[in-house]
Image (spheres, rainbow, N blue to C red):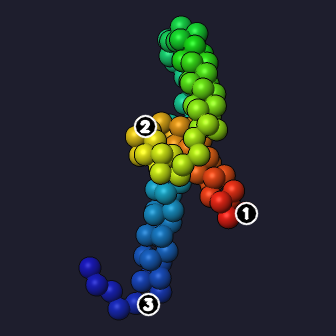
Amino acid sequence: EATLDLAERRRIRSAIRELQRQELERDEETLASKRFRPERSSHRQDNKENWPQSRRLEEEQQAALAALSEQLEAITSVEELTKLLRAAGEYEERKLIRAAIRKLRAEEIE
């Protein structure tokens, strides 16, 4: 209902703000409890089981990157490197190729 009393309007607005503040605090508490929820023990067990496989994949990737790095040192054409860059799928591969391109361009400038 509409009221003409200004003091009553202030009390109503104040009560509304307090309710909104309380609701916001509840939402923040709920979000915090979800954010810091402990992991399930089965999930940790899955991680332990997959660890050797992920470790092996990481070692294989490092070996492939080392081989690519040696291959890039032998290439002296920016065009060839650009073709390799467009064909590369992994971020780390593209990163190495871009570094090789920058190195060649710097040598050309010198």
Residue appearing at x 66%, y 52% in the figure: 103
Report x, y in % for residue 27. 47, 50
Q: Is residue 95 left or right of residue 86?
A: right
Residue 102, compared with residue 100, is above or below; it is below
Q: Residue at x 40, y 90 (%)?
A: 5
Q: Nearer the viewer, residue 2 or 19?
A: 19
The residue beneath circle 3 is: 6
The answer to the question of whether label 2 and label 1 lie on touching residues, with beta carbons closer than 8 A, is no
Instruction: Tell which of 38 and 88 is nearer to you.
Output: 88
Quarter of the image for residue 63 reads: top right
Q: Nearer the viewer, residue 26 or 45?
A: 45
The answer for how far apart the CA atoms under marks 2 and 3 are is: 67 Å
Q: Position of residue 31 (x, y in %)?
A: 50, 44
- The three-letter code of the residue at mark 2 reads Gly
Q: Secondary structure at mark 3?
A: helix
Three-letter residue code for mark 1 = Glu
Residue 110, which numbered label? Answer: 1
The relative height of residue 18 versus residue 70 in the rendered view (above or below) is below
| Residue 29 seen in render | no
Residue 62: name its quadrant. top right
Dot placed on the residue nearer the N-terminal end, 2 or 1: 2
Q: Position of residue 90 (x, y in %)?
A: 48, 36
Q: Position of residue 33 (x, y in %)?
A: 54, 37
Q: Tell me how far mark 1 sits from mark 3, CA to CA.
A: 79 Å
Left or right: residue 105 versus residue 77 is: right
Q: Residue at x 51, y 46 (%)?
A: 81
Position above or below: 60 against 86? above
Label 2 sits on a secondary structure element that is loop
Indicate which disc residue 89 carries. 2
